[in-house]
C-alpha cells in the first residue's frame, strides 16, 4: 500500500561521528511502512530553534493537503513560522 508519512523535529543525527548525541535540530519526514515495521528518515532542514520556550519549539505539522510542513523557529532572532514544500517527496 501507499506509505504513511510523519513529520518530526527531533532525534535525527546526520553524522554520529561528530559527537552530537542530541539530534533535535532537524525537521524530518518519516516514510513509514507499518506492516513491515520500518521507518525511513528523510531530513529536510535544520530548524535553528533555540528551544528557549514552547513558543519557539518547532512543533512541525502538515497542511491539510499533506504537501507542506509548517514549523516555528526563532533562528532569525524572533519567533516566525516557516514552510517547507514536500509535495515531490510525499506524492511518490
Image (cartoon, rainbow, N blue to C red):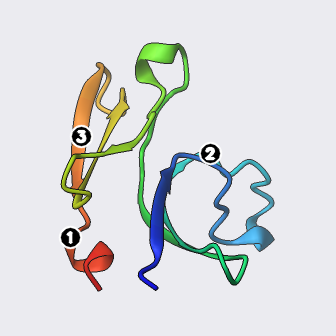
Residue 30, given in percent of the width and then of the height, sits at: 52, 66
In the foreground, 78 or 44:
44
**How far from the left and from the top, in percent, is residue 10?**
61, 48
Question: How much space separates mark 3 and mark 1, taking CA atoms?
Answer: 16 Å
Say left or right for 65 vs 30. left
Residue at 25% in and 78% down: 91
Q: Earlier in the sequence, mark 3 or mark 1?
A: 3
20 lies above or below 48: below
Relative to 43, say whether 88 is above or below.
Answer: below
- Quarter of the image for residue 92 reads bottom left
Secondary structure category for the residue under label 1: helix
Instruction: Of the two numbered discs 1 and 2 on the same chain, state the one appearing first in sequence.
Output: 2
Is there any visible trace of residue 9 in the rendered image? Answer: yes
Q: Secondary structure at mark 2?
A: loop
Disc 2 crowd, CA 10 A, few/some/many (<14, 14-19, 20+): some
| Residue that badge 1 annotates | 87
Secondary structure beneath disc 3?
strand
Label 1 with label 2: CB-CB less than 8 Å: no
The residue indicated by pointer 2 is: 24
Which residue is disc 3 drawn over? 82
Nearest to viewer (mark 3 / mark 1)? 1
The residue carrying pointer 1 sits among few (fewer than 14), some (14 to 19) or many (20 or more) residues within 10 Å by Cα, namely: few
Q: Position of residue 34 (x, y in %)?
A: 64, 73
- Whether residue 28 is visible to the viewer of this picture, yes or no, is no
Q: Position of residue 11 (x, y in %)?
A: 68, 53
Which of discs 1 and 2 lies nearer the camera? The answer is 1
Left or right: residue 13 compared with residue 52: right
Q: In the rendered view, tell whether residue 46 sits above or below residue 16.
A: above
Amino acid at each position: 500500500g501507499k506509505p504513511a508519512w510523519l513529520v518530526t523535529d527531533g532525534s535525527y543525527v546526520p553524522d554520529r561521528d561528530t559527537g552530537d548525541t542530541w539530534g533535535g535540530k532537524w525537521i524530518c519526514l518519516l516514510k513509514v511502512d507499518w506492516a513491515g515495521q520500518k521507518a525511513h528518515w528523510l531530513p529536510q532542514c535544520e530548524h535553528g530553534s533555540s528551544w528557549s520556550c514552547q513558543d519557539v519549539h518547532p512543533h512541525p505539522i502538515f497542511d491539510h493537503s499533506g504537501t507542506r510542513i509548517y514549523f516555528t523557529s526563532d533562528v532569525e532572532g524572533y519567533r516566525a513560522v516557516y514552510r517547507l514544500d514536500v509535495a515531490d517527496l510525499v506524492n511518490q
